[in-house]
Amino acid sequence: MPLFFRKRKPSEEARKRLEYQMCLAKEAGADDILDISNCELSEIPSGAFATCKVLQKKVLIVHTNHLTSLLPKSCSLLSLATIKVLDLHDNQLTALPDDIGQLTALQVLNVERNQLTSLPRSIGNLIQLQTLNLKDNKLKELPDTLGELRSLRTLDISDNKVQRLPQMLAHVRTLETLSLDASSMVYPPQEVCSAGTEAIQQFLCKALGLEYYPPSQYLLPVLEQDGTKTSQDSPDGPSDRFCREEVEWQNRFSDYEKRKEQKMLEKLEFERRLELGQREHAQLLQQSNSQKDEILQTVKEEQSRLEQGLSERQCYLDAERQRLQEQLKQTEQSISSRIQKLLQENQRQKKNSEILKSLENERIRMEQLVSITQEETENLRRREVASAMQQMLTEVYQSRLIQIACEAHGQNLVQQTCSSMAEMGERFQQILSRQQMDKKKVISQILQEVLFSLLGPLSGVTSVAERHAEGRVRGAPGEEGPDASADLEAGNDLGAALGPELLAPAAAQREDTARGGASGDPDGVRSQKREQAGKLLADSVSAALEPETPVLEAAGGGPGAPAGGPAGGTVSGALPAYLRPPPHLTGHAEPDGPPGPGQGGRL
């Protein structure tokens, strides 16, 4: 249902019909019926409620309208307290008022073909209701208060969505006709509902533990009880009762006449008021006509003014429309260009997406290949590591075997070296002993030769040296004779054999002799000098021969020392150059090249 809707205005014919029915209901002597059906009403007018309340109408007929609610605003159901028949069929009612139980005099309620979804619980207060027609609505259930309708005789709930009947309906003993859709019923079962009203009532009474009485048998004791009460109230007999009834009827007739006269008076008063109203209506019509002419004139002027303004407005709107059309064209062009750009962008994005998809597939494929390659690489690496470890173990094993062989070979070499060292030591001892013997022989021979040739060759050596020095100074060593060169070689050999220790006294003696010859010393002085030189020579030789054993030990020639020590492993290596034996006596070859420092010539 919309929140805002426009009320449907009734047509002219419906409005006239409503006025006629309202006037007819207000006439004197009119019946107790107010019929405002087929008037296209969306709500009951408040005047109808006032008419029912003032004239105490018994029947209100409002069917075939457009009612959505029974009560308009500022109206009460108490205005319909005297209504016995309320006909509301063929409307659009969605609900009945919650206080509908205030219509205690209501006997017939017809709400057929409406939009009711539920019934108010106060409907049980309608104790005089005899006919309830709920056909063709949208009811899903019935209230339990229907069991309080003790006078209900006819109930029609067909063409609804009701599937269960309230058990309290068994208390309605006067129910004679119950119309429903047996095929859609759940309680009572379909077979019970198909059997009729009596079977339904018997089923409901059995469910509540009540004894079932047919409506006719239930109403008969009540009527008999009313008759006995009436006979008890009239002890004088039927004649008195007839007289009493006749008087009562006469009283009622007189009351009716009075009411009729009253109604006639009311009718006359109403006609007078109606005539006054018609006059007033005529005056109002005249005034309205004059006002209508004025209004028409003003309307014409306003219309002309509006037409002029409308034409101006139309021109302005045409110009505005043209401007808007131009703007719209420009907008459409810009939009079309943007759409074209968007389409191009979309195509580019699609291409990019395709490229991205292909790249993603390529990446996935590469990842798979990389994973496979990594696995293969890992397997290869493991195989290589295994092979390398195997090779390393093989090499370690081989190196271990080689080490063992080297150790064995080293031990053999050590044993051989030790044995060779021992042999060399023995040989060295033999060589030392032989050298000592040779040394003693050489020393004795040298001493003899030195002693025999000390006086003669010494002077010859000095003279040769002097002549050689003079020849070098003159720069003509080649002019000397063969004797001079021979003397020079002999002096060099002797000087190398004697050494600087022994030549020093001879040089001193020669200097003294030269000085003595130059100064004219006698021969006794020369002989004295020679004796002194011989003593010095003997002392130096004896001093050189004393430290024999320490010299041998310092030279590395002791027992157990290996051959080829720092001094060559011979005795001559530890002696001074002038005391070394000649090579042909020791069995060693003479070294090539000039003698080193501290070594003399061959003796």
Image (cartoon, rainbow, N blue to C red):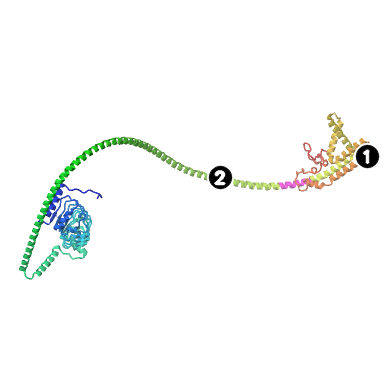
Query: Residue 363's image quarter?
Result: top left
Q: Main secondary structure of the magenta part?
A: helix
Return the mark for residue 388.
2
Q: Nearer the viewer, mark 1 or mark 2?
A: 1
The span shown in magenta is: 417-430
The answer to whether 533 is drawn above or below residue 148 in the figure is: above
Could you tell me the amino acid type at mark 2?
Answer: Ala
Q: Using residue 387 as the reference point, say whether residue 3 is left or right of it.
A: left
Q: Residue furthest bottom?
A: 235
Residue nearest the viewer, comparing 408 with 219: 219
The answer to whether 415 is drawn above or below residue 230 in the figure is: above
- At 85% from the left edge and 45% from the top edge, which residue is drawn? 543
Question: Dot 1 corresponds to which residue?
Answer: 525
Q: Where is the C terminus found, in terms of image quarters?
A: top right
Question: Pointer 2: residues within 10 angstroms few (<14), some, or many (20+)?
Answer: few
User: Does residue 30 appear in the picture of this structure?
Assistant: no
